[in-house]
Image (spheres, grey):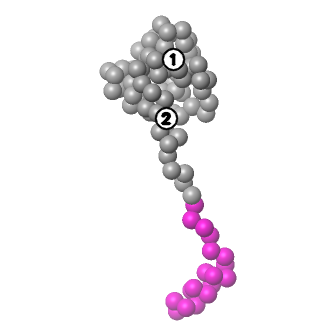
Amino acid sequence: MKWNLRLVAAQRGIWKATDLQRRFAEHGLVISAGKMSGLWSKTPASLKLDDLDIICRVLGCEVGDLLEPEAPVVPAPRQPDVVRETTARIAE
C-alpha cells in the first residue's frame, strides 16, 4: 500500500507535520513527535482504525485517499543452471 498522508495534507494547505499534529490533538488524537514524524515521512507498519478515522476527519478525506494499492513487485523467475547452459551453447 502507498501511504499518501503528506500529499493529502498538502492538497488541504497543510505543509508541516507539526501543524497536522496540532489539528489531530484538537480532535483528540495526541501523537508524539516521533510517531508523527513516522506518519509524515513513511508508510506506517500499523495504524489503529480509530486513529485512521480521526485522520480522515481532520483532513476531510476518505481512507482510499490515504491508502492506495500498489502492484506487488514480483521478481523474475530464475532459470535453472541447465537451461542457462543450454541457452549459452545455442547462442555460440
Q: Is residue 67 above or below residue 78?
A: above
Q: Is residue 15 above or below residue 42?
A: above
Region in magenta: 75-92
The quadrant where residue 29 appears: top right
Depth check: give the residue in front, 36 or 56: 56
Mark 1, residue position: 54
Q: Main secondary structure of the magenta part?
A: helix
Q: In the picture shown, does residue 64 fall above or below 35? A: below
Residue found 39% across the figure and 31% down from its top: 7
Q: Determine which of the numbered discs, if any, sits on residue 67 in the image.
A: 2
Nearer-the-camera pick, 57 or 78? 57
Mark 2 residue element: strand
Disc 2: CA contacts within 10 A as few (<14), some (14-19) or many (>=20): some
Q: Amino acid at mark 2?
A: Leu
Residue 38 position within the rendered picture, expressed as x and y whole percent measured from the top left: 54, 27
Inter-mark Cα distance, 2 to 1: 15 Å
Judge whether residue 41 can be spotted in this image: no
Q: Position of residue 19 (x, y in %)?
A: 41, 15
What residue lies at 61% left-to-right and 81% top-to-bottom? 84
Q: Are marks 2 and 1 in contact (CB under 8 Å)?
A: no
Residue 52 visible at all:
yes
Residue 66 rendering spot, x and y as whole percentages: 46, 31
